[in-house]
């Protein structure tokens, strides 16, 4: 396999008429430069330079190959420049994964605003509660509740203090009454959520910083959080949802918060990517805008 550093030494030697000069410019010894030329000529099966202790000239094969070598190095440098430019500007294609409720009910308007501010950005949005495999699927960044299980992923906080809230519709509460403690939930129809094929039927609360756990049951489960929210709004049972997902329903009375003397389970929201080097100016700008809009949304009355 031809090495780029060998090509660079060959071009530099041809331009300077000296292998020693090429060695100096590339900060290597003459022996290393000579080895690079031997390696390149061995790969090509051709003599590129006719050289002695005092002179150096291109052979006919060397003259034919020189422009190809220049083109290769130019393309590599152009690619490096393009990547460096991309690391400095906000733009390009960005593939984003978002959970069901958040993706359908909140993020749309904020992404509109983001692209209005940064028209060079092209977005591809995947809305699903199934956790995307960021190493196998074409997803650049993902919005996720809770910290990722994979410690190799980078999680940038969007709503670090977000928690779950227990809620039900006024109609459901009129028919079945209000639970007064987590234990009372055993007597209610609880709308359970499935994530990554795991049924979440143990609901956790906190009272005076002490955890309180209850095993719940009900006649419906779903792997789509948005459908669970709709069931709750339609009076089908009690849901335990991220406050971000049901805040609009709580504010307009479609849902009522329950057990407010208990603290809900933490459900921090993050923007997740695979590596620190993936946190481009575009990703940083998106995180900044989403963080600001989420904070404002949680604060607004």
Image (spheres, grey):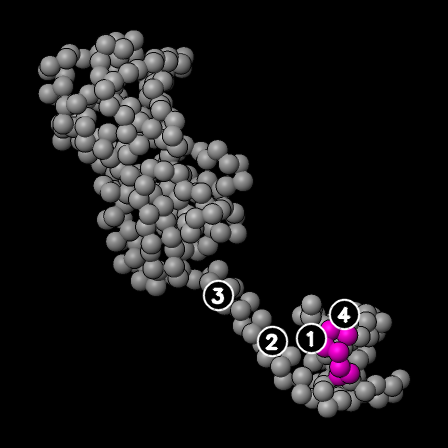
Residue 72, numbered label: 2
Image position, residue 262 (x, y; %):
31, 15
Which residue corresponds to mark 4?
27
Sequence-first tag of 2 and 1: 1
Sequence-first tag of 4 and 2: 4
Q: CA distance from mark 3 to mark 2?
A: 20 Å
Q: CA distance from mark 4 to mark 1?
A: 15 Å
Q: Quadrant of residue 104?
A: top left
Sequence-first tag of 4 and 1: 1
Residue 100, numbered label: none
54 horizontally vs 49: left or right: right
Q: CA distance from mark 3 to mark 1?
A: 25 Å
User: How many numbered callouts?
Assistant: 4
SS of the residue at dot 2? helix
User: Image quadrant for the C terminus?
Assistant: top left
Using the rendered image of the protein, determine whether residue 149 is visible from the camera's viewpoint. Answer: yes
Q: CA distance from mark 3 to mark 4?
A: 27 Å
Question: Who's the residue at 54% across and 40% down the image?
Answer: 152
Image: magenta residue range: 42-48
Which residue corresponds to mark 1?
7
Number of residues whose C-alpha sits closer than 10 Å to that of mark 3, classed few (under 14), some (14–19) or many (20 or more): few
Would you say residue 22 sits in the magenta stretch?
no
């Amino acid at each position: 396999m031809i090495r780029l550093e060998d090509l660079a030494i060959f071009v530099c030697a041809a331009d300077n008429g000296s292998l020693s000069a090429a060695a100096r410019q590339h900060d290597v010894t003459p022996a290393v430069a000579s080895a690079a030329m031997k390696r390149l000529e061995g790969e090509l099966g051709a003599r590129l330079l006719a050289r002695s202790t005092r002179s150096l000239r291109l052979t006919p094969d060397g003259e034919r190959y020189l422009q190809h070598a220049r083109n290769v190095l130019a393309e590599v440098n152009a690619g490096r420049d393009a990547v460096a430019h991309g690391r400095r500007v906000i733009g390009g294609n960005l593939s984003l994964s978002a959970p069901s409720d958040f993706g359908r009910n909140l993020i749309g308007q904020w992404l509109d605003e983001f692209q209005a501010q940064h028209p060079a950005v092209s977005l591809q949005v995947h809305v699903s509660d199934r956790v995307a495999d960021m190493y196998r699927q074409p997803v650049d960044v993902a919005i996720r509740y809770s910290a990722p299980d994979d410690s190799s992923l980078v999680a940038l906080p969007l709503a670090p203090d977000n928690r779950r809230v227990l809620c039900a519709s006024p109609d459901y509460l009129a028919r079945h009454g209000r639970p007064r403690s987590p234990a009372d939930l055993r007597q209610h129809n609880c709308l359970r959520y499935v994530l990554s094929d795991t049924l979440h039927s143990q609901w956790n609360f906190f009272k005076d910083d002490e955890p309180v756990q209850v095993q719940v049951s009900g006649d419906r489960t779903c792997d789509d959080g948005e459908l669970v929210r709709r069931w709750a709004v339609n009076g089908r049972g009690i849901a335990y949802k991220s406050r971000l997902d049901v805040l609009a329903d709580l504010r307009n009375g479609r849902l009522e918060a329950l057990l407010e003397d208990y603290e809900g389970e933490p459900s921090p929201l993050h923007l997740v990517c695979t590596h620190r080097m993936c946190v481009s100016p575009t990703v940083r700008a998106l995180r900044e805008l989403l963080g600001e809009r989420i904070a404002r949304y949680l604060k607004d009355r």
